[in-house]
Image: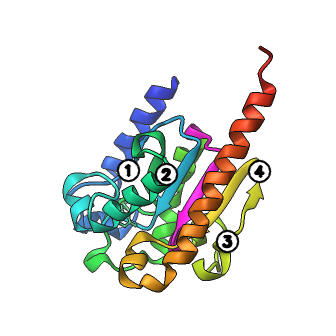
Amino acid sequence: MSEDSEWTALENEIAGCTLCPLWRGRNRTVPGEGNRHARVMFVGEGPGAQEDLQGRPFVGAAGQLLDRMLESIHLDRKEVYIANVVKCRPPQNRTPTEGEAEICLRYLRRQTALIRPRIIVCLGTPAARAVISPDARISAVRGKWIERKGFWLLGTYHPAALLRDERHKVAAWNDLVMLREKLRELDMEAQDDEVF
Ligand code: URA
Ligand code: SF4
């Protein structure tokens, strides 16, 4: 299958998915969007009200903050890929259950396999639990790089958490600086590989 048809198949499967109970409450599935060859993939928790209506990730208040966070390190939303642990909105925006996250993770795994990003940034605890380790807490895993199977993993606060609690802003900024530095390092490595 070509890469394009794998993406189409994946998005069609998500659009029709009834594997966990979250499908019952959704208006739209929110598979994720962005550059399918991105060097950086961001992983959030799950769609909120706006995302559920529009079928797009991070378009509400948290999304606007995420856009500003990206801008602050000269990243454009179109350069990166943005996805979530679960693709359907949990009722009242509650945290997805472990079971829901585990079932839906098959799609995030396929997205990751297709994109092959160099860096995965986990936004908040549910993303860190899905990607980094099942008992992770964001306050404990943030701010340090984890290298795994050729991927660089970083945790940082979810933008919705930053909107609720200003105290994490300095730490989140430090994480963004780490991300910017890592991207610079990867650029240099890529240049070293150039023959001409
Ligand atoms: N919060 C998330 O975790 N994901 C979204 O897509 C929007 C808000
Ligand atoms: Fe399927 Fe994921 Fe939606 Fe659950 S949240 S119904 S697993 S797409």
When asked about the image quadrant of residue 140, the answer is: bottom right
Q: Is mark 3 within 8 Å of ligand 1?
A: no
Horizontally, residue 50 falls left or right of residue 186, namely: left
When asked about the image quadrant of residue 191, the answer is: top right
Marks 4 and 1, how far apart at CA: 24 Å
- The answer to whether residue 141 shows anywhere in this view is yes
Instruction: Please report whichever mark, 4 or 1, sits nearer to the chain's N-terminal start.
Output: 1
Q: Identify the amino acid type marked 1.
A: Pro
Mark number displayed over residue 149: 4
Q: What is the secondary structure assignment of the residue under circle 4? A: loop
Span shown in magenta: 114-127
Marks 3 and 2, how far apart at CA: 18 Å
Which residue carries the number 2 mark?
107
Say which of marks 3 and 2 sits in front. Answer: 3
Q: Please name whichever residue, 27 or 165, is drawn nearer the observer in this view of the structure.
A: 165
Q: Is mark 2 within 8 Å of ligand 2?
A: yes
Q: For the C terminus, give its image quadrant.
A: top right
Q: Are marks 2 and 1 in contact (CB under 8 Å)?
A: yes
The percent coordinates of residue 84 (x first, y second) are: 44, 59
Mark number displayed over residue 133: 3
Q: Residues within 10 Å of mark 1 (few under 14, many from 20)?
A: many
Mark number displayed over residue 31: 1
Q: What is the secondary structure assignment of the residue under circle 2? A: helix
The percent coordinates of residue 1 (x first, y second) are: 52, 24
